[in-house]
Image (cartoon, rainbow, N blue to C red):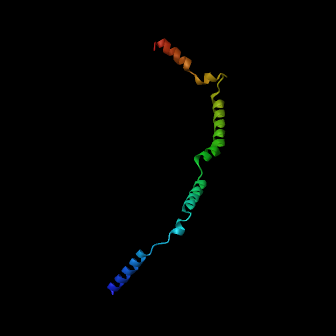
Amino acid sequence: MNDNRDERLDRFFSAARSVRAETSAIEEFFENRLLASLREKRESRQTWFSWTWRLVPIFVFAFIILGSVSLIFEGWSSTDIFSAIANGNDDYQVVAYLEGE
């Protein structure tokens, strides 16, 4: 009984191997379908560049808030912009000169 099943199975496999599959319908316009699916996936993804432009207003708002808070709490009396940058630098140079460094 097992021999009959094995023989029949072997005949089915050999028949399946001898029949050539019809792939012309699948091959037709394959490149177009592939490119269309890639284009659709690319358009559905959002790039980092689009996110940066969406986040610019938030960063500008944070910059304005932090700048105004730092100006309020620092309380510089000088209106010279370079005095804020070089604050304390003059003292360091005098001490370095007097110590001989």
**Residue at position x 54%, y 69% in the image:** 25
In the rendered image, which quarter contains the C terminus?
top left
Give the percent coordinates (x, y) of residue 37.
Answer: 57, 59
In the image, 23 versus 80, the foreground residue is 23
Task: In this rendered view, identify the residue nearer to me: 100 or 20.
Answer: 20
Query: Image height check: is 97 above or below 73?
Result: above
Residue 73 located left or right of residue 7: right
* Residue 70 x/y as whole percent: 63, 32
Front residue of 68/33: it is: 33
Measuring 35% from the left and 83% from the top, which residue is drawn there? 7
Residue at x 65%, y 39% (from the top left corner): 60
Side (left or right) of 19 relative to 38: left
Extreme residue in the left direction: 3
The correct choice, above or below, for 47 with respect to 36 in the image is above
Q: Nearer the viewer, residue 50 or 71?
A: 50
Q: Position of residue 91 (x, y in %)?
A: 54, 17
* Image quadrant in which you'd find residue 17: bottom left
In-image side of 17 versus 67 (left or right): left
Residue extending furthest bottom?
1
Q: Quadrant of residue 80?
A: top right
Count of labels in the image:
0
Tell me where residue 16 appears, x and y as whole percent.
42, 76
Tell me the quarter of the image containing the N terminus: bottom left
Q: Residue at x 56, y 63 (%)?
A: 29
